[in-house]
Image: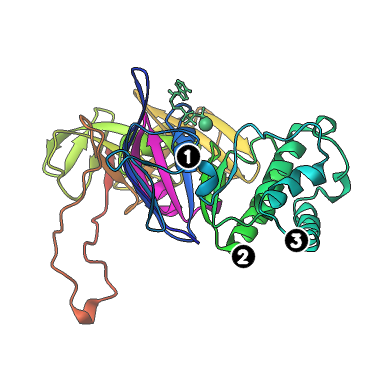
Amino acid sequence: MSKIEIRNLVKRYGQATALNKVSLTIESGEFLVLLGPSGCGKTTLLRCLAGLETPDEGEIVIDDHIVYSSEKKVLVPPGKRNLGMVFQSYALWPHMTVRDNVKFGLDVLHTPKDVSNQRIDQVLADIGLAHLDERYPSELSGGQQQRVALARLLTTKPPVFLMDEPLSNLDARLRMDMRVELKRIQGETGATTVYVTHDQTEAMTMSTRVVVMKDGDIQQVSPPGLVYRQPENVFVAEFIGMPLINLTELEHVDGSLFSNGDITLNLGWQPDVAKIVVGARPEDLKLGPARKDSAEFTVTALLPNGPETIVQMTRGTTVLVARLGHETGLETGQTIHVSFETEALNVYDASTGAMVRRPRTQGLPSLTKSIAPATGRNRNELVGT
Ligand SMILES: Nc1ncnc2c1ncn2[C@@H]1O[C@H](COP(=O)(O)OP(=O)(O)OP(=O)(O)O)[C@@H](O)[C@H]1O
Ligand SMILES: [Mg+2]
């Protein structure tokens, strides 16, 4: 178990900045997932932690030991950082069998032979490779090779796991099984884990916290539920979740009313900006008969997808997407009345993309009312204009 502190880390490649003053504390035993579009700096950050890349500025501290500091001129080599890694390329020895590849990590640590053999058997069984232990890497599929690389990491039980898309080459079914296995092994060993993935489901299901990155900057660090429910800015809101969040730009009309000509929304409070972007998840739209706070839309597409159906609706130039159960009873072209789920909306400043927080309009809850939220949100009312 190890705690990792990253302070103002900068990594440049020529003119390009891959990491732009990244600061992050990773708690001992945490399963931290780095998520973000291609090229945002996930692998670079992991490689800097591992010591495979030398940053230009900043500091990395693992369990109170400085392993990198530009100011103090410290650079601890990878082998002395006590970390285990699995990277995007698996780096298996081609002339060694699966068992010998896995054993290699243990041999480096001078692990006694009986302990070594027992652990290898266990891990190979856990990740479904026991029957392939005498094969060579060239005789394995990409997914099998990836699992050998994982086995090599897991058998050595390092206090820190660094994993760069370790399941990317597995099919959907195997990926699911491996998520469960990895999470179990991580839980058992208590290893502090930094895990890079493109896969949001992986991030959401495995992490204790998600770090969303963009262009070498951290955008948000939150538990997965919060990243989904309360994205800090428009970028995170749009990056997380499939189908995409509904982002609708509205201008201030009067008081708490905002409109884009097609719809007028009564937020129930007044953000201090002239133009807002309202974020509503597809499941936060309510469809049904006309209500005081609903607006009439036309169904423009129905996309059934197993247990759910994605419904696209249009009013003027405003397009909204809702997520419903598999039997919607709707037809393309029909009109439908739409309102927003109260409490669920996030409001962003259209010019900066940053979340606009609702000011506290009520005092702190008294002891007798401690169950009630401190700031009850008013109904967000949506009306056609
Ligand atoms: N060795 C290198 N030389 C020059 N530029 C590099 C090098 N390694 C990475 N970069 C650049 O640094 C940026 C961050 O790259 P990085 O590999 O960390 O992205 P990533 O988030 O892991 O992306 P992906 O999801 O595609 O793996 C990119 O713009 C990339 O082109
Ligand atoms: Mg990468």
**Amino acid tagged 1:** Gly
Q: Is residue 22 above or below residue 374?
A: above
Packing grade of label 2 (10 A; few <14, some 14-19, many >=20) is few
**Residue nearer the viewer, 114 or 149:** 114
Q: Which residue bears the numbered disc 2? A: 188
User: How many numbered marks appear?
Assistant: 3
Query: Looking at the picture, how far across and down is residue 287, in whole percent?
Result: 44, 44
Q: Is residue 230 magenta?
A: yes
- In the rendered image, the residue lying farthest to the bottom is 368
**Dot label at residue 328:** none
Q: Nearer the viewer, residue 203 or 11?
A: 11
Q: Secondary structure at mark 3?
A: loop
The magenta region covers 206-231
Disc 1 target residue: 51
Question: What amino acid is found at the position of numbered circle 2 in the picture?
Answer: Glu
- The first of marks 3 and 1 along the sequence is 1
**Residue at image x 76%, y 42%?**
101
> Is 260 placed above or below 338 here?
above
Callouts 3 and 1 close, C-beta under 8 Å: no
> At 40% from the left edge and 33% from the top edge, which residue is drawn?
297
Quarter of the view holding residue 310: top right
